[in-house]
Image (tube, coloured by chain):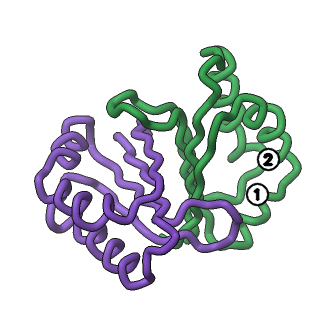
Chain colours: A green, B purple
Amino acid sequence: MLRHVVLFTWNPDTSPEVRLATLEALRRLPEEVGGMTSFAVGPDAGLVDGNADTALVADFPDVQAFRAYAEDPRHLAVIAEHVRPHLASRSAVQYEV
Amino acid sequence: MLRHVVLFTWNPDTSPEVRLATLEALRRLPEEVGGMTSFAVGPDAGLVDGNADTALVADFPDVQAFRAYAEDPRHLAVIAEHVRPHLASRSAVQYEV
């Protein structure tokens, strides 16, 4: 199984409303695109200084399923509309679990 | 449940042997420290350019269990000995799942 992990840090001036709209758009991805066996996205809990803002962890049966998701126009549209305009930095890994 | 996610990028000159030793040290954490309900650490699969090098995802029953792990001397020793000396950058989030 391939685990896709992304940590997002938003521009500091990104409003709470925009952060929530982005989170909701990301949360619709399983329903709109699918292909993953598990999916959890959420805001940092504020327990440790210096953390990123939002984490997304999604498991896929294999690399092909991940690539189909990553290249899906609906996924790309969410990135273009809800992520990239507010993104300060992003870190990601895909690894076998 | 609280999910702890860390993405590590190692100094470019970190040898494959050191990377493996670091991975093995991190993999011993459930056995040596415990407190998590799931734990998966592994190297990036090399599917996407610009990714970090290693991901660690661990789930804890609650914040207290996470803090006990984070502050445990054996965890801190692994960080001091196997992570910090080779670390170029690190990104982390803890979030409710």
The residue tagged 2 is A75
Is A11 located above or below residue A94 in the figure? Answer: above
Residue A60: x %, y % from top left:
62, 64
Q: Are marks 1 and 2 on the same chain?
A: yes
Q: Quadrant of residue A24?
A: top right
Q: Residue at x 26, y 58 (%)?
A: B79
* Viewport quadrant of the N terminus of chain B: top left
The answer for which chain carries disc 1 is: A
Compared with B14, A36 (above or below) is above
Query: To which residue does mark 1 refer?
Result: A70
Q: Residue furthest bottom?
A: B17
Residue A70, quarter of the rendered image: bottom right
Residue A48 position by quadrant = top left
Q: Is residue B59 left or right of residue A74?
A: left
Q: Position of residue B49 (x, y in %)?
A: 70, 65
Q: Where does residue B37 sit, x and y in percent of width and height?
A: 28, 55
Identify the residue at horizontal 59%, vertical 73% (top origin): B45
Q: Nearer the viewer, residue A40 or B42?
A: B42
